[in-house]
Amino acid sequence: MAFKLLTNIEKEVTCPICLDLLKEPLSLDCGHSFCKACITEENKESVTSQGRKSSSCPVCQIAFCSGELRPNWHVANIVERLQEVKMSSEEEQKRNLCERHEEKLVLFCKKDGKVICWVCERSQEHRGHQTVPMEEVVQEHQEKLQTALQKLREEQQEEKMLEATLKEERTSLKNQIQNEKRCVQAQFKKLKTILENEELRIVQQLESEEKAILDTLAATELELVQQSQLMRDLVSELEHRLQGSTADMLQDVNHIIERSKNLSLKKQNMFLKEQRKVSRIADLKVIIEAFGGEECWSKWLAVGVL
């Protein structure tokens, strides 16, 4: 029925002159349409043979002038759609033919899962295989394909849900890490302030200790100079007595001997250097170990920080 309908439509849009589908159709007032090239050529021949400008319709013979020809876009669109349908129909028919034998595909080979023609069934390639008419396996394979499609759709839906979950998890983890990073930065900023304050405190202590030690050393040095002067004076006096007369040597000899016994060099501040070796380094080691442990302490020692 569809083929008959297409045939009737094709007749309606066929040029009466060239008997082919209308190309650039032009219509007359009488309602008949022709190809532009056909009706133009027809008009030229009519004018040449009869010597007049007016022409008559090749179908109904009603006279018309060349100025009455009008483009029929409606018919042109119908022709275009008809050509598309014919092309599609031809391609469909071609698809239903065996590419090798150009016979109609009517059989299904169960072993190979292919649609074949009757010549293929008798060929060496499919000889001995179980074949059945296509119509007998259509429903079975439709159900199989429908099951496979349903399975894939379910997996596709599951994949979308998994993708959404991963996206949500990625966002959550990213936010979590960003929060942790900000927290770490804030903690280290606070720690930096604490360390800077601790550094300032220890440096101030060291400067205060330095001043006290230097003052002590200066006093000790002054006392040492004074003791050195007394010792030189006493040495000179003893040398003078030993070089002089006997009377001069024995004059107040007990006093000078007593002075020599009582004069001795004081060394009470000579332990300061040894005491300083363990002064502030121990405190600094405790601070570093609180953040980096023994390994960090060793690394800082290796690079010369300590």
Image (tube, rainbow, N blue to C red):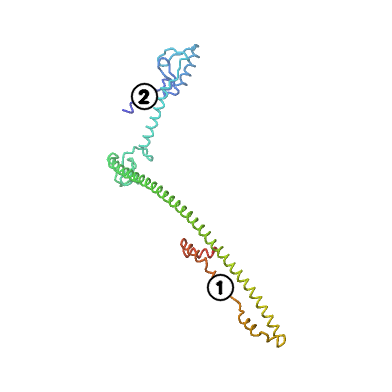
The percent coordinates of residue 233 (x first, y second) are 68, 78
Q: The residue under label 2 is which amino acid type?
A: Ile
Q: The residue under label 1 is which amino acid type?
A: Phe
Specify few, some or many for label 1: CA neighbours under 10 Å numbering under 14, 14-19, or 20 or more.
Answer: few
Dot 1 falls on a residue whose secondary structure is loop
Total labels drawn: 2
* Foreground of the two, 149 or 168: 168
**277 vs 58: above or below:** below
Q: Which residue is disc 1 drawn over?
A: 271
130 lies left or right of 208:
left
Dot 2 falls on a residue whose secondary structure is helix
**306 vs 43: above or below:** below
**14 vs 48: above or below:** below
The percent coordinates of residue 201 (x first, y second) are 52, 60
Q: Which residue is disc 2 drawn over?
A: 9
289 lies left or right of 226:
left
Tell me the number on the disc at residue 257. none
The percent coordinates of residue 176 (x first, y second) are 41, 50
> From mark 1 to mark 2, how far is it between C-alphas?
125 Å
Q: Quadrant of the N terminus?
A: top left
